Amino acid sequence: MPKVSDEHKEQRIQQILLAASEVFKSKGYEQATLKDIVEEAGMSRGWIYLYFKDKTTIFLALIDYLDAQLEERISTLLKENKGSAHGVLISYFQETSQSIDRLEDSVVPAIYEFCTTGWREQQVRDYFVNRYIRVTAIFIDVIGKGVENGEFKPTRSVDEIVKYMISSLDGIMLHSLAFGSQQINAVQQVNLLINQLMEMLSVNFLKIMEKNS
Amino acid sequence: MPKVSDEHKEQRIQQILLAASEVFKSKGYEQATLKDIVEEAGMSRGWIYLYFKDKTTIFLALIDYLDAQLEERISTLLKENKGSAHGVLISYFQETSQSIDRLEDSVVPAIYEFCTTGWREQQVRDYFVNRYIRVTAIFIDVIGKGVENGEFKPTRSVDEIVKYMISSLDGIMLHSLAFGSQQINAVQQVNLLINQLMEMLSVNFLKIMEKNS
DNA sequence: ATTGAAAATGAACCATATGTCATTTATTAT
DNA sequence: ATAATAAATGACATATGGTTCATTTTCAAT
């Protein structure tokens, strides 16, 4: 006779992830302790071990959750833009550009921290390689759609373009964090990146205009 | 009657920095403790406090030292390339490209870690803003020389170009670290970045060829 | 050689996080 | 209502790092 339902258990996990998210936002990854998370959740010390083995496990679960949101967001954008890959990319970059100023209040810094502190552990490495493939796949898919419907005629492999795009974007975000978005002129940099990207994709604006009308 | 000379003191500091550098290379920033550094230096626990207040101070001194090396390297490259800014940039990127595979054995990961963990502290923030200005200045200077002698005719402000360049480069390095240089195809990405850069600088190859001959 | 002050030592203390586990609480089936 | 069992608690044991400081060592001036 189990005492609580699976649903209840699921809720508990959500509760932990929510608390963890808050703690990671305000303290970053390394500085955050299980103690903090437990306190934020308003529960007792040993309790959390019933659900999560350690901080790493909690964090990876949180990233999974956020990545699922990204995937969903892109799919929403695809609908909003009536299947225009160009529209999706522009919207996505617009949102990203705006989010840079609020970077400090998000979990993003903790993610960068996690990368830079955790890459020595095999478990983390494996997870991240997997994640990289998953995230690049999302954008490769979007651009692939754009190629199919004639919006883009890439001058190099889509894989290469996507990899370059997210490297640069992460670089800009990292610099925003370390040096301040004003200092590095983040918005300008993102615009520059979009230009470069569109150049490499050889956007067919005629096609896009006729699609919009 | 002071017991040892200033020179001796300077040597001590070098000794600590060397030990610290080794520790930061192998353990990264957060995982490194003053205990580790003291042990690596083969000295006793409390000793280090006579020279450095805390880990942060040691690390900043180490970065200063490395930055001075970069500055020197660029100045050497300028001589080697007989004042050709284009040559300097190509050489520099070549070296960077090669160093990416050895990233894990360098202090670079610790620096990224330091950025991502330390940006909340005002002291660190201030230091990094300063450092950013210093490092960008080095490249602005190089490209500026290239503009003066007709190698480059930039299509946008040199400041913007340099900022974009180092953001992207750091993004590529960060991704190399997190996902592996093979996985992200780092060399290809650096090449792509060089192309973008040369595009923005509108390189006058005729001028460069006649300078070389 | 002696002496005195700075340099270096390392034991000890403090603080803090992790993780375990015996105990208590809550819930559901009977 | 009661029993049985899972969930939750929180004290405690363990470990580890930072920091202090009384003591010892070293070196240069005398």
Image: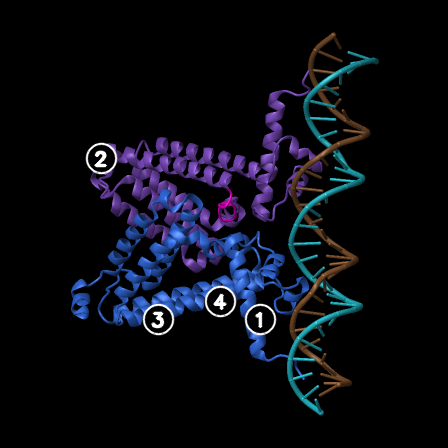
Chain colours: A blue, B purple, C cyan, D brown
Q: Which residue is mark 2?
A: B150
Q: Horizontal placement of B130 versus A55: left or right?
A: left
Residue A99 pos. (x, y %): 37, 55
For label 3, the crowd category at 10 Å Cα-Cα, with few meaning under 14, some 14 to 19 and many 20 or more, is some
| Left or right of residue C4, residue C16 in this image | left
Residue B59 shows which numbered tag?
A: none
**Chain letter of the residue beneath label 2 in the structure image:** B
Residue appearing at x 63%, y 64% in the figure: A43
Marks 4,2: beta carbons within 8 A: no
Q: Is residue B189 left or right of residue B30?
A: left
Image coordinates for residue B129, horizontal then vertical, percent: 42, 39
Q: Is residue B119 magenta?
A: yes
- Quarter holding residue B74: top left
* Chain at tag 1: A
Residue A177 visible in rendering: yes
The residues colored magenta run B114-121
Residue type (three-letter) at the residue carrying disc 1? Arg
Mark 4 vs mark 2: tell me if same chain.
Answer: no
Q: Are marks 3 and 4 in contact (CB under 8 Å)?
A: no
Q: Nearer the viewer, mark 3 or mark 1?
A: 1
Query: Spatial distance from mark 1 to mark 4, Cα to Cα?
Result: 17 Å
Residue at mark 2 to residue at mark 1: CA–CA distance? 66 Å
Q: Position of residue A122 (x, y in %)?
A: 57, 60
Give the labeled residue for mark 3: A75
Amino acid at circle 3 = Ser
User: In what quadrant of the picture does the N terminus of chain B appear?
Assistant: top right
The residue at which mark 1 appears reads as: A12
The C terminus of chain B - image quarter: top left
Mark number, residue A64: 4
Q: Is residue A153 left or right of residue B100?
A: left
Question: What residue type is disc 4 on?
Answer: Asp
* Amino acid at pointer 2: Gly
